[in-house]
Image (spheres, coloured by chain):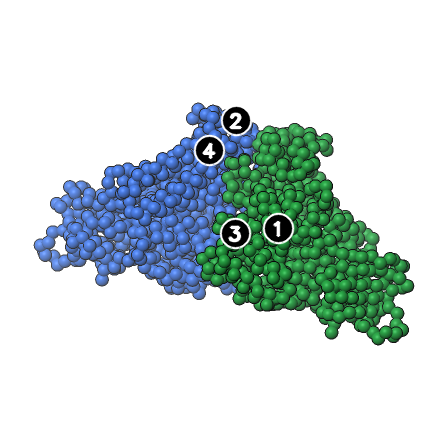
Chain colours: A blue, B green
Amino acid sequence: MPLPVPVLAEGVDPAWLPPAAFEPLGTRRTLIRGSGPMVETVHGEVADAVARFGGRVVRDPEPGDGMSYDLVLELTGASGDEGFACGRQDGTTTVTASGRRGLLYGLFHVVRLGEDAFRGEWAREVHQPAAALRMVDHWDNVAVHPVMGQVERGYSGGSLFWADGRARGELERVRAYGRLLAACGINAVAVNNVNVHRTEARLLTDRIGEVAALADALRPYGIRTHLSVTFTAPIVLAGLETADPLDARVREWWARATADVYAAIPDFGGYVVKADSEGQPGPFTYGRSHADGANMLAAALAPHGGTVHWRAFVYNHRQDWRDRTTDRARAAYDHFVPLDGKFADNAVLQVKHGPMDFQVREPVSPVLGAMPRTRLALELQATQEYTGQQRHVCWLGPMWSEVLRFRPEAESSVGESAARGGGLVAVSNVGDDPFWTGHPLAQANLYTFGRLAWQPGADPGRLLDEWIGLTFPGASRRLAAGLHAVLDGSWQTYEKYTAPLGVGWMVQPGHHYGPSVDGYEYSPWGTYHFADRDGIGVDRSAATGTGYAAQYAKPWSEVYESPDTCPDELLLFFHHMSYGHMLHNGKTVIQHIYDTHFKGVTEVEEARETWASLADLVDPARHARVAERYEEQLRSAREWRDQVNSYFFRKSGVADAHGRRIY
Amino acid sequence: MPLPVPVLAEGVDPAWLPPAAFEPLGTRRTLIRGSGPMVETVHGEVADAVARFGGRVVRDPEPGDGMSYDLVLELTGASGDEGFACGRQDGTTTVTASGRRGLLYGLFHVVRLGEDAFRGEWAREVHQPAAALRMVDHWDNVAVHPVMGQVERGYSGGSLFWADGRARGELERVRAYGRLLAACGINAVAVNNVNVHRTEARLLTDRIGEVAALADALRPYGIRTHLSVTFTAPIVLAGLETADPLDARVREWWARATADVYAAIPDFGGYVVKADSEGQPGPFTYGRSHADGANMLAAALAPHGGTVHWRAFVYNHRQDWRDRTTDRARAAYDHFVPLDGKFADNAVLQVKHGPMDFQVREPVSPVLGAMPRTRLALELQATQEYTGQQRHVCWLGPMWSEVLRFRPEAESSVGESAARGGGLVAVSNVGDDPFWTGHPLAQANLYTFGRLAWQPGADPGRLLDEWIGLTFPGASRRLAAGLHAVLDGSWQTYEKYTAPLGVGWMVQPGHHYGPSVDGYEYSPWGTYHFADRDGIGVDRSAATGTGYAAQYAKPWSEVYESPDTCPDELLLFFHHMSYGHMLHNGKTVIQHIYDTHFKGVTEVEEARETWASLADLVDPARHARVAERYEEQLRSAREWRDQVNSYFFRKSGVADAHGRRIY
């Protein structure tokens, strides 16, 4: 029986799967061959499309029925392979897959192609995801956290999964979410926050049924479910007096608990763990290494085919700002590189893309090039914690693409290594908001992430246009160009009006929205800029600084070591420079700060105008939501401009070369 | 029947009324004459003391019984007069009062005198409170506020009155609180926060019974109960569509609601109102003046003898930091002085002591000298919102005394005017903490406030010793001297290590604990210091600044107008000065900042040592609580020192003349 496509509640946006995106498919005659649950999902999709647009779908016809088909979708096996082949000959487009998910991805490939899927002839192309794991991590709490709320760093309303301590039970919406994820290539979801509080801890044991219900809803779209667990689960859930990963009772408890999880969810993906980080417990408590900790969980998961994702976000968050020798940027490398080769095969070390924490500009984490004998996953952040919190347009595709194409050493890019290793992970930007992501244009971030996880070398601009094409089917050239224009440069725009030259962290403490130049300057978080009346920046050179630059292989260790070769956009991350220092771009540091901040605001004003000019082409609710957020973005960008410029003018005493207003 | 004294639960500190403080009285023979409920209170006090220490108490004996008495307490009337006379002749100390409360205050006077009350002979002295109203305002919420908690700006645990949306019903503790208040001369309590939220609004109407229960508990100690109300009560409680103070239905509603309040609480004190302030509604909504608003409530209260306390804390809390012409310090004067003479007789304008908000150093509010035809109450803050939050020792007696003795014009001091006018008010520092005030030594603030309200010209050092004598009866010379030493200079110590020279506001936004030099610098709250690389401070002169200095009468307008005559400790409040400016104390501004910050920390270290040296003389629980808080105070003071010094060193580039460590 074909699986019906999920029905969206009134007012919920279809995002990049509006019915009209299925029109080219829906007007055609499609043949589906094969069997198994995923074929029913594919059948349901096609059946829904043809019912809407007048085409036809046939399932496994008798040989010699004499029919001809525009599209043949064929599953030839039942492997775990996710690839598919697609070609067109003699008026028929054919998608073949040997694995369950491959057929689904092939279908969505056809949807993406639109009318092009049914034009001309083309040779059979093989499509294969670069990374086996393409995951979104939800920082959703089950119980509302007094400070962080229902979703930690969530800017899209409540959680799709949980509300006020309970499972929401709105599984049709969860199914629709799984469908959106599948359509951009994502195949794994972690359903709860990496900060595992008391209520969430119990999802592992007596509340596993609630996780299983989510897994059941997501499975038809090829998505495996993962769970964040607390390292102290044996203590808080079972009353053991230790969580020592080398203690036999602890290991036995995890083995049993994990077997119970798999009894409830046979295709369970595995655990996500934040240990010894920002107050979360971990193996350090017992004098054990992070390899000990991760491998203990890996051993529990291995018999069932599961994986542990062990986060590398470990640093001293009780640092003394007076101490300039401790460098948070060094921490992940210092903690984990000595453990290279010690992690089990099904233990993945999950590494944030930069050494700090999702700032708008950071160098690529040196860990990503320094652990050849460890499966590394790359962690990106779709939720815009530091990049405008979905009140600002900030399309992160270009930033992620830069990271993925960065080559820590000659052999592989970050994207290639992560794809071969532990996969690509993004912190979700989705909630129960009608537009899914708060800001309607922030949908592009989730979509782009999924597609980059499939193909890390893809041109992000092409993926953006893909998203535009799906989300606004039949968009006029003016609309498509306008959407591209407001999104394409939005990351660089955001960078311009916020913290300059890679220095980061000039945000309001705690909630991280809006400027506070000194907000983290005297804090324990290890996030300083050291601005004084003469200059600004952190000396992370090996020669005179913290030595962080030496954590890179050549050529990067040399490039970053000297201000002469360090790229402008990272200069203050690696060096403390005088305001009068001349950048490669021909401006002084201080004049660059002024210019970019004025420019960034101008660019927001222009984007707002562009958006306003599209009012006749976008449905009113979506247009109004975006227009309203542009007002806030502009207000906020002006606040950033004026606070940052005033701060540095007051400190440096250097007047703007163009005499613009600084307060 | 004598009223039994309240029984304290196990572990609750008796504060300044420990049983031993009653020993001199309790060993004597006392005669009580008079009738009425307050005489029963007095009788209960004496009966408890003599039961404990072996004396005797007699009530209204037959003439000629032949007994002689050490003490005679006599009520001769039933007026509202609060004074009493006290003298000693022929071995008998006599207290006479013509009013109910006078006898009670006379009794506590005898307790304060201790053995001295029964030594020698002395002429009859008349004691009379300077102010008719001596009030504490509780910022206690009924329902826990998501940000502010159960008690707004409370640092002493929960509320004595409310918990989780309900009345606590622990009336014995409330009675004990009333007794402590009476013993220092306080005669009025406002039982809920001036920010009146939805739950609290209903105390006025259907929940008045809960207020009446508190009033019943407090009444035997001479305390009238007041209630904070919301200006929109007619809308939120009765569904009227307006709260316009000139609307007949609104006026009628208030008249009726107020009559109902008095039916429940015949001696109800009146209303406290925060209107058009920090988001609270008020008469501005209807284009009416604050006199219109206050007088409408005064009219409702007048038939019953009640008073409205209308707060003058009105300013623009959505200011643009870029705008240097708007000056929050001016706001209360600008709003209220034009209304002088327009307020009803039973309307009191309640004015904070400084123009900003309870900073450790502010000039006296110019409103206090500029409204001769208005009854003004002076509002002080016993809860240490900006002065260490009861984790730091900061005895505010000297600061309050400075304010009270300040003479806005030649005729009267602030204390004399407020006493004649609307009275003295302190925001309470009390909660359900076993020591009442969180920090055991913070009890001295509440005690000192009550005594200064009775006698605004009193020497605060003498009141401090009075508190020490009562709280530590029979203290050795070493203990008394040690307590005096750690408290007496603590306000100046706190000033030294926090914001310098009157500039204020260098605190962490929101919770207001700990340093953040730029924390409020780019905020909408109107609280700026304008530090740049050359200097710091706010030009509030008439000649070149905001004109605030001209809100004072001569000589103060002239004194504050010029940096040459402005007192050092207020220099940066009134003037923007270069770091090299030479103070009257012979130091530059920058060197003064460095010196005071190093000195302040040294003083905390010394106080901590002094406290440690008293370990053998103080009960262990109290000693430990204070010792533990000294650790935090010292940590915090060092943080203040280092952040403030580093901030100004980085900005000014001027090295410390003594080469001390600045980061």
Which mark is in front, 4 or 3? Answer: 3
Q: Which residue is mark 1?
A: B349
- What's the chain of the residue with tag 1? B
Instruction: Judge if badges 4 and 2 mark residues of a common chain.
Output: yes
* Residue under the image location 23 percent in, 60 percent down: A2
Q: Amino acid at mark 1?
A: Leu
Q: Secondary structure at mark 4?
A: loop
Q: Earlier in the sequence, mark 4 or mark 2?
A: 4
Viewer can see residue A641: yes
* Residue under the image location 61 percent in, 33 percent down: B542
Spatial CA span between label 4 and label 3: 47 Å
Which residue is at the front of the view, B580 or A541? Answer: B580
Percent of width and height locating residue A297? 45, 56
- What's the chain of the residue with tag 2? A
Q: Secondary structure at mark 2?
A: loop
Tags 3 and 2 in contact by the CB under 8 Å rule?
no
Quadrant of residue B364 within the rendered picture: top right
Q: Which residue is mark 2?
A: A654
Spatial CA span between label 3 and label 1: 15 Å
